[in-house]
């Protein structure tokens, strides 16, 4: 697809051949033929720089796009887009595959501490679940236990781990120490 370099590719888990490409400056593109042709799919996309793209495993026509200014979503296979309830600078987003209503995001605060946010309603509302003194960049949810969250800290160059039952206030516990 056109529109700068491709930053993320994601496939529809329920429809063969449907692939989405996020680009650095051109928004989102959609292919229905395994990438042979692409259609621009960025109507009302709030920002054209897309740093992350996620498909809701329960509803594959619902996608989430990660921007510097927040997370946008579509419910019609990238037909039209709008902001979620989180409009702030972000570093990363994670999706809970076991409980698809749960989303996790790392806010890009200008100075530490950074904040990890959680949504239980597919991005409509968000609450803090952990604060870290480092510089978290990437978040992912353990696919076998959605209570376990892993975060990559760019400053410490380490993988950290926390659980939803016992979120840490002063920092995320190092995964290799758990």
Image (cartoon, grey):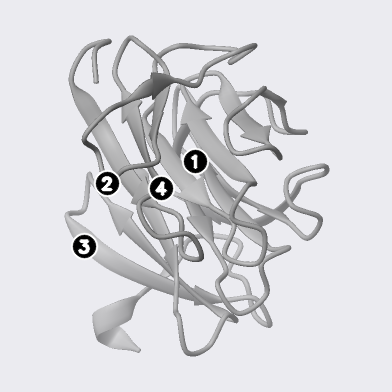
Q: Position of residue 137 (x, y in %)?
A: 34, 44
Q: Position of residue 133 (x, y in %)?
A: 43, 48
The residue sitting at 71% across, 40% down in the picture is 75
Q: Nearer the viewer, residue 126 or 55?
A: 55
The residue sitting at 27% across, 28% down in the picture is 37
Q: In this image, 139 relative to 125: left or right?
A: left
Whichever of labels 1 and 2 marks the residue nearer the N terminus, that label is 2
Q: Which quarter of the rendering shows the C terminus?
A: bottom left
Q: Determine if residue 92 is in view.
A: no
Whichever of labels 1 and 4 marks the residue nearer the N terminus, that label is 4
Q: Which quarter of the rendering shows the N terminus?
A: top left
Q: Is residue 9 above or below residue 56?
A: above
Residue at numbered disc 3: 158
Badge 3 crowding class, 10 Å Cα cut-off, few under 14, some 14 to 19, many 20 or more, is some
Q: Position of residue 146 (x, y in %)?
A: 57, 80
Label 2: element kind: loop
Q: In this image, 30 relative to 65: left or right?
A: left
């Amino acid at each position: 697809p056109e529109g700068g370099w491709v930053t993320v590719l994601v496939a529809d888990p329920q429809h063969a051949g449907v692939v989405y490409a996020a680009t650095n400056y051109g928004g989102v593109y959609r292919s229905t033929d395994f990438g042979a042709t692409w259609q621009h799919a960025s109507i009302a996309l709030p920002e054209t720089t897309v740093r992350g793209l996620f498909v809701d495993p329960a509803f594959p026509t619902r996608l989430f796009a990660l921007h510097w200014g927040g997370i946008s979503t579509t419910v019609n296979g990238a037909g039209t887009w709008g902001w979620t309830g989180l409009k702030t600078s972000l570093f990363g987003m994670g999706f809970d595959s076991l409980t698809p209503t749960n989303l996790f995001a790392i806010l890009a605060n200008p100075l530490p501490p950074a904040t990890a946010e959680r949504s239980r309603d597919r991005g409509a509302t968000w609450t803090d679940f952990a604060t870290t003194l480092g510089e978290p960049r990437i978040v992912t949810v353990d696919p076998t236990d959605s209570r376990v969250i892993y975060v990559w800290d760019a400053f410490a160059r380490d993988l950290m781990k926390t659980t939803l039952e016992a979120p840490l206030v002063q920092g995320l516990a190092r995964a290799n120490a758990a």
